[in-house]
Image (cartoon, rainbow, N blue to C red):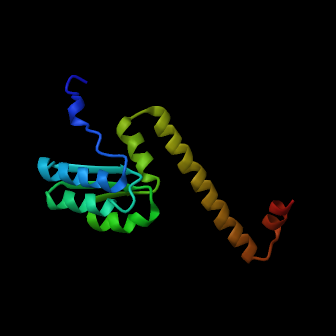
């Protein structure tokens, strides 16, 4: 808090490409050691990630836009895909509630996967138990 300075967080623009130009300009002027991109980046993601690489910054990206995952994987040093982003946030914050939430999601995913495998196996053997269970 004592190192916070409002001038370090300029408003660049509400327009996508004007914002991109502003970020690229800041990256070229300041030459940061790292660039972390998390959130809803669309077609500007490649421009920002590529500029970060060109100035020598370590790039860590996380795309919420599915079509950008391949682009960000090519242009980034590290990429968080899908639900790795909230899991990384929970891990770094060390907040017990966030970590418990991630753990519960993992448990439910494991149970779901086990039921899918069990259902496929039982259906292959000719039993209609799961079909009748789900259709009633």
Q: Nearer the viewer, residue 106 or 126?
A: 106
Residue visible at 60% across and 50% down in the picture: 108
Q: Is residue 123 above or below residue 39?
A: below
On the question of residue 80 being in view, the answer is yes
Q: Tell me if residue 77 can be seen.
A: no
Q: Quadrant of the C terminus?
A: bottom right
Which residue ends up furthest to the right in the rendered image? 136
Q: Is residue 81 left or right of residue 13?
A: right
Q: Is residue 1 above or below residue 21?
A: above
From the viewer's side, name the closer residue of 58 and 54: 54
**Displayed quadrant of residue 72:** bottom left
- In the rendered image, residue 71, in percent from the top left (x then y), is placed at 34, 67
Residue at horizontal 21%, vertical 33%? 7
Image spot of residue 31 (x, y percent): 13, 50
Q: How many marks?
A: 0
**Camera-side residue: 107 or 87?**
87
Tell me where residue 3 sits by quadrant. top left
Residue sitting at 75 percent across and 76 percent down?
A: 125
Figure check: 7 above or below 71: above
* Image quarter in which the N terminus is found: top left
Extreme-top residue of the structure: 2
Decide which of 40, 103 is in the foreground and name it.
Answer: 40
| Quarter of the image where one finds residue 93 | top left
Q: Residue 25, how many percent across, how many down?
A: 18, 52
């Amino acid at each position: 808090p004592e190192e916070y300075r409002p001038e370090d967080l300029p408003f660049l623009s509400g327009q996508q490409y004007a914002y991109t130009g502003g970020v690229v300009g800041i990256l070229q002027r300041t030459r940061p050691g790292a660039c972390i991109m998390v959130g809803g980046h669309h077609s500007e993601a490649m421009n920002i990630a590529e500029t970060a690489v060109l100035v020598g910054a370590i790039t860590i990206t996380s795309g919420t836009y599915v079509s950008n995952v391949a682009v960000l994987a090519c242009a980034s040093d590290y990429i968080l895909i899908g639900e790795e982003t909230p899991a990384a946030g929970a891990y770094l914050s060390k907040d017990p509630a966030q970590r418990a939430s991630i753990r519960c999601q993992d448990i439910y995913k494991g149970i779901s996967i086990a039921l899918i495998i069990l259902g496929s196996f039982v259906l292959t053997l000719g039993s209609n138990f799961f079909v009748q269970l789900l259709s009633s």
